[in-house]
Image (spheres, rainbow, N blue to C red):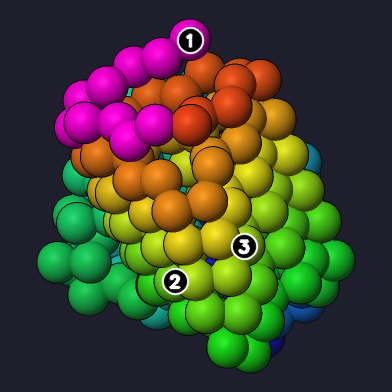
Amino acid sequence: MKKIILIGAGGHCTSCIDVIETQKKFKIIGLIDNIKKKLLLGYKIIGNDKEIKKFSKKAYYALITTGHIKNSKIRENLFKKFSKNGFKFPVVISPLSHVSKHASIGEGTIVMHGAIINAGAKVGKNCIINSKSLIEHDAIIGNHCHLATRSTVNGGAIIQDNSFIGSSSAIKQNIKIGKNCFVNANLFVRKNLKNNSKIS
């Protein structure tokens, strides 16, 4: 198994650990976080992101396991920082999800249990495609986005960088969501959203 370090030891990390354990492609050798607790689901917290050079000697791969709800900046900055220091970010896909062989997924993205990504869809780097979310045919998801649980992005829709789509929300086909947008849970988005839009 390939060795991997997880960056962030909060609630989202626990879900990522379960996906990685189920996938059985990577061995988690430790977590990186500023919190003081020593263990998460039996895995050691081995330091914080200021000790990045030390970690590069332990593992070649890393995954950002810090969550993203209101703001993606923390995830984005960690991704850039660890990339510059030589870490590689694999695509992590739960075997309990379905990803079409005709879809593409960028580095550092995790596809959680029960998610579906259909033919022609494109997903960017460092995204969270959360449990039971659906990305339909030919939809495009930018970098550093989070599609929360049971969210739906219909065919041909575009979600630009750093945007968040809340649980059980749906984006109408061919709709464009701009950069840094926030869509709250349980909404149906029928119209295009400009950059930095927030709807609830």
Q: Amino acid at mark 3?
A: Glu
Image vertical order of residue 150 relative to residue 94, above or below = above
Residue 34 highlighted magenta (yes or no): no
Q: Which residue is at a point 66% across and 20% down the rendered structure image? A: 186
| Contact flag, marks 1 and 3 (Cβ < 8 Å) | no
Is 165 situated left or right of 144 in this image?
A: right
Image vertical order of residue 166 relative to residue 40, above or below = above
- Find disc 3 in the rendering and name its residue: 136
- Find disc 1 in the rendering and name its residue: 200
- Find disc 2 in the rendering and name its residue: 122
Say few, some or many: other residues with alpha carbon within 10 Å of mark 2 (under 14 / 14 to 19 / 20 or more): many
Say few, some or many: other residues with alpha carbon within 10 Å of mark 3 (under 14 / 14 to 19 / 20 or more): many
Q: Amino acid at mark 1?
A: Ser
Is 90 situated left or right of 26 in this image?
A: left
Q: Say which of marks 2 and 3 sits in front.
A: 3
Q: Secondary structure at mark 2?
A: strand
Task: Report the Cα–Cα distance between label 1 and label 3.
Answer: 23 Å
Q: For this rendering, which residue is in front, 77 or 54? A: 77
Q: Which residue is at a point 52% across and 51% down the rendered structure image? A: 173
For marks 1 and 3 on the same chain, the one whose residue lies earlier in the sequence: 3
Image vertical order of residue 116 relative to residue 23, above or below = above
Q: Which residue is at a point 52% across and 18% down the rendered structure image? A: 184
Quadrant, the N terminus? bottom right
Q: Secondary structure at mark 1?
A: loop
Residue 98 at what x, y percent from top left? Answer: 76, 72
Segment colored magenta: 191-200
